[in-house]
């Protein structure tokens, strides 16, 4: 990379209000490094207690989503069980945003799209009710073969977001359609 | 009966289970990569403790500052074990401590209790000022 590219990258990040950003391989060790760095950054920025907790929670859910469900094209850049992805946090006037991007197998796009579309139209009360119902759903593991967690990750992110969560899927041309790039953003 | 004492880490809470005094203490943050690996030994030991003999009383003090979504299922299992012991005649008290500004942990306690349906637990919300 030449310095001009770096300058453009830096200007773009500053314009977007980015105060924290990582792109690369996600695995268990990196998760610990990123968690600690984010906590330190939130302390440094003097973020208030409840907002800090919500930002950290959304970060953990997003990063663990990448770790557990992210696609790995297997081209050697991110050895298994690592998953390539990016996560960033930034400030916009009165609020903070967190966004992440990672690969997902293209056949799962419809499923994730459906879940997020439903979430977007729900009120906070509906999200809380759905969370409560899902927490008590002990059949989840048996009925959802893809989910590895409690099925509560996206609900947790949506619950803390002050605006409807935003998402986008972009075809990943390098893998000839096997994967799509999945972007997710929440505002706190 | 086996006691448990885990040291607090960045992503897992301190857990102290004392089978002689019939107490459980959990404090810290909880977001391990694999919650089952962390919780199963604890929940298994608690289950074996109550299966062996239902004590007259049990006291759990839980002071979590953050729980990730995957770990909430393990918390549900823990509550179910305690609820079964209470149903079998043990007087189980849970002090659910949380930062009074943190409605997420308060909500989690209420959601866990709601998820039990009929409950014999004595559940006390104990907000504190951080």
Image (cartoon, coloured by chain):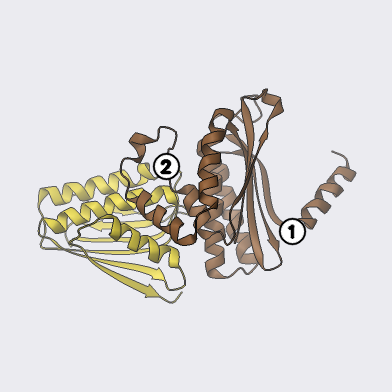
Chain colours: A brown, B yellow
- Whether residue A175 is visible here, answered yes or no, is yes
Seen from the viewer's position, the closer of residues B63 and B116 is: B116
- Whether residue A28 is visible here, answered yes or no, is no
Q: Chain of mark 1?
A: A
Horizontal placement of B115 versus A127: left or right?
left
Q: Does dot 1 land on a helix, a strand or a loop? A: loop
Dot 2 corresponds to which residue? A149
Determine the residue positioned at 39% across, 49% down: B71
Dot 1 corresponds to which residue? A17
Q: Horizontal and vertical percent for residue A90? A: 68, 58
Q: Mark 2 or mark 1, which has the lower sequence index?
A: 1
For residue A179, which quarter of the picture?
top right
Residue found at the far right of this picture: A4
Determine the residue positioned at 13% across, 57% down: B87
Horizontal placement of A150 versus A104: left or right?
left
Residue found at the far bottom of this picture: B129
Q: Horizontal and vertical percent for residue A105? A: 57, 29
Q: Is residue A74 above or below residue A3?
A: above
Q: Is residue A145 above or below residue B34?
A: above
Determine the residue positioned at 33% across, 73% down: B126
Horizontal placement of B129 versus B25: left or right?
right
Q: Horizontal and vertical percent for residue B75? A: 33, 53
Q: Chain of mark 2?
A: A
Q: Does dot 2 land on a helix, a strand or a loop? A: loop
Whole-number angstrom distance, CA of label 2 to CA of label 1: 32 Å
Q: 10 Å neighbourhood of mark 1: few (<14), some, or many (≥20)? A: some
Horizontal placement of B84 versus B74: left or right?
left
């Amino acid at each position: 990379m030449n310095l001009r590219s770096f300058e453009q990258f830096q200007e773009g990040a500053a314009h977007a209000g980015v105060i924290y950003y990582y792109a690369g391989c996600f695995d268990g060790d990196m998760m610990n490094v990123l968690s600690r760095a984010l906590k330190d950054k939130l302390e440094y920025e003097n973020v208030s207690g409840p907002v800090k907790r919500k930002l950290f929670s959304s970060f953990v859910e997003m990063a663990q989503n990448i770790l557990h469900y992210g696609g790995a094209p297997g081209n050697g850049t991110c050895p298994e069980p690592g998953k390539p992805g990016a996560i960033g946090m930034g400030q916009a006037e009165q609020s903070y945003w967190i966004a992440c991007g990672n690969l997902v197998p293209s056949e799962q796009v419809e499923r994730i799209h459906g879940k997020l579309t439903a979430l977007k139209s729900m009120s906070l009360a509906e999200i809380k009710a759905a969370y409560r119902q899902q927490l008590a759903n002990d059949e989840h593991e048996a009925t959802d073969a893809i989910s590895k967690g409690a099925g509560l990750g996206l609900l947790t992110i949506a619950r803390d977001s002050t605006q409807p969560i935003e998402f986008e899927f972009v075809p990943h041309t390098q893998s000839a359609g096997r994967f799509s790039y999945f972007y997710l953003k929440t505002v706190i | 009966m086996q006691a448990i004492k885990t040291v607090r880490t960045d992503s897992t809470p301190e857990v102290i289970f004392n089978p002689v005094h019939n107490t459980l203490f959990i404090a810290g943050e909880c977001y391990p990569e694999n919650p089952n690996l962390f919780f199963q030994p604890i929940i298994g030991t608690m289950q074996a403790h109550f299966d062996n003999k239902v004590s007259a009383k049990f006291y759990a003090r839980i002071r979590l500052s953050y729980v990730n979504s995957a770990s909430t299922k393990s918390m549900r299992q823990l509550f179910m074990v305690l609820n079964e012991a209470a149903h079998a005649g043990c007087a189980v008290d849970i002090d659910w401590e949380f930062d009074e500004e943190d409605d997420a942990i308060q909500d989690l306690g209420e959601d866990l209790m709601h998820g039990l349906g009929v409950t014999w637990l004595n559940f006390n919300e104990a907000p504190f000022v951080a």
